[in-house]
Amino acid sequence: MMGLAWPPDWRDRVVSDSPSHVVILDVIDLLPRRHRYLPRGRPIDRCVVHHTGGPNLLAPPQGLLRTAGWLTRVRRFPGFPYQFYVPHAPDIWPDDWPWGDGRFVVYQTQSANVVSWHTREGGNPSGISVAFQKTARGDISAAQQVCAVNLWRDHIRPRWGLRNLDLQTHSMYGKKKCPGPTLESWVRRERGL
């Protein structure tokens, strides 16, 4: 798809076909991992928003694979810690495939059925996470802003029965600059604060 070096089975990887501006593709099995995360023992009751710095705004699959490789090799995570990944310049779903109406591609990068290491103790056991690839200044793109709203409102919130107050940021768990000012403002607006 779009010149990416992923397997050609894109249609079989669609996770969500909700009437939204995003198409979610499952690439969990394509990412490096050291071992498996533990199974989730609690219901999901929150979604934590993060940013990731790179590497160097490379497009998928290179940027996603290099970030996943760094997290597993250098940080020693069992696997990619975020359930969803939104590239800085999301791909557009091809016109000749279903929903060829300009939808952005978002990647499901970790199962929601495991306790991944995305937010320290408080957020991991019952939280899922979304990571936005950002620029060095901490900005996200206009396309990512569209993805954030639609991924939250049309997929994550209804799928897990979450409320707007269940949308959180990594900064709420002590990581002060994560996810950055644009996403912090968006989360505050969604939460009604």
Image (spheres, helix red, strand yellow):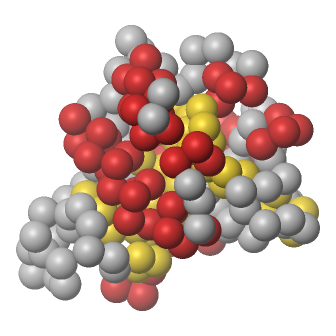
Write down the quadrant of residue 45 in the picture.
bottom right
**Residue visible at 72% across and 52% down in the picture:** 127
Residue 166 placement, left or right of 193: right
Residue 103 placement, left or right of 30: left
Comparing 129 with 37, the one in front is 129
Residue 156 placement, left or right of 33: left
Examine the rendered structure and indicate whether residue 85 appears above or below residue 159.
above
**The N terminus sits in image quarter:** bottom left
Comparing 150 with 9, the one in front is 150
Write down the quadrant of residue 95 in the picture.
bottom left
Examine the rendered structure and indicate whether residue 104 appears above or below residue 130.
below
Instruction: Give the image location of residue 112, x and y in percent.
Output: 68, 66
Question: Hey, which residue is sitting farthest bottom in the picture?
Answer: 12
Instruction: Give the image location of residue 109, x and y in percent.
Output: 57, 59
Instruction: Give the image location of residue 83, x and y in percent.
Output: 61, 56
**Residue visible at 38% across and 65% down in the picture:** 154
Q: Is residue 123 visible?
A: yes
Q: Is residue 10 visible?
A: no
**Residue visible at 34% across and 79% down in the picture:** 17
**Residue visible at 43% across and 40% down in the picture:** 190
Write down the quadrant of residue 160 in the picture.
bottom right
Comparing 25 with 152, the one in front is 152
How many numbered discs, if any? 0
